[in-house]
Image (cartoon, rainbow, N blue to C red):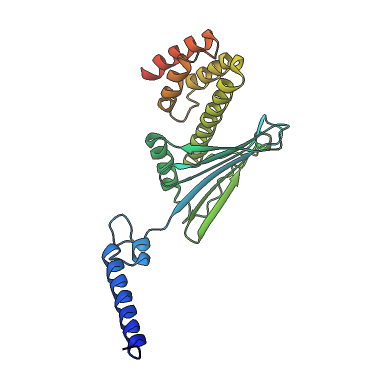
Amino acid sequence: MLQGLPAALMVLSAAISIYAQDQGAKHNPRPQSQVAASGANGDTKTEAIKYSYEFSQPKFYIKHIVLEHDANGRGTVTFERLNEETPIVEPLQLSSEALARISSAWQALQFLESDSDYQASKQFPHLGTMRIAMQRGDRKRVAEFNWTNNPNASTLVNEYRKAADQAILIFDISIARENQPLNAPKLMEAMESLLKRDGLSDPKQLLKLLQDLSTDEHVPLIARNHALRLIKKIQK
């Protein structure tokens, strides 16, 4: 019996291995490579698309902005202020309405298929330099200009500027609530100014923040009351 023991152990080991493979196949019937290659319909491979907007003017208070997002409007806003060396990075989620406007402008430009120069004949370098970029798979294109007469390119940079301004405003309000509550009244004035000139990406995204601010006893009463007035204006 002892002489036949190694052979028996080998048979048992092989049986265990076959059983483990069979169980793994039941739990994961599709190879991982096939799962990764499947798209929304389960059989179409899709390439991720990345979009970005950059603004720079070393003399401006907000001297540098980089906004990046994916096809779902999720991304980040990175910005630098004058006399500050450390950039601030904040999460970004474009609303469905803002994303629709941005996507429409990109589609109208046919950006990756085009080699158009969006720079106007007249230069305005003192207003800052803008760069828009798109990447799909291995294809990438960047366009730079300081002023444009192209309506779709103009719409695109204006939408991105609104999104960046809104993200920076949200960041400043969060800092004020935590550490500088006396700044809250000025920030409410800044928000109202942006609201009046259509300078926000989607004011409805600010409603929850304003509601929280209106009941935050750490900030001055004037700021809380102002938040309530802004809620009413946005909801109209």
Q: In which quarter of the image is residue 8?
A: bottom left
Residue at (38, 58) in percent of width and height: 46
Q: Looking at this view, is 45 or 156 the one in front?
A: 45
Instruction: Indicate whether 78 appears above or below 201.
Output: below
Please determine whether, in this image, residue 70 is positioned above or below residue 23. above
Q: On screen, 68 above or below 234?
A: below
Q: Nearer the viewer, residue 30 or 54?
A: 30
- Residue 89 on image: x %, y %: 58, 38
Image quarter of residue 172: top right
Q: Residue furthest bottom?
A: 3
Where is residue 145? Give x, y as percent.
60, 43
Residue at image position (28%, 72%) is: 19
Task: Residue at 35% x, 88% y: name it.
Answer: 2
Work out which residue is located at the far front of the displayed protein and give it.
1
Q: Quadrant of the N terminus?
A: bottom left
Q: Give x and y (percent) for residue 53.
A: 55, 43
What residue is at 52 percent from the left and 56 percent from the top? Answer: 140
Q: Nearer the viewer, residue 168 or 119?
A: 168
- Viewer-nearest residue: 203 or 16: 16
Q: In this view, does 36 lie to the left or right of 85?
A: left
Q: Is residue 78 left or right of residue 139?
A: right
Does 138 appear above or below 77? Answer: below
Question: Measured from the top left, where is residue 134 in percent x and y?
Answer: 50, 51
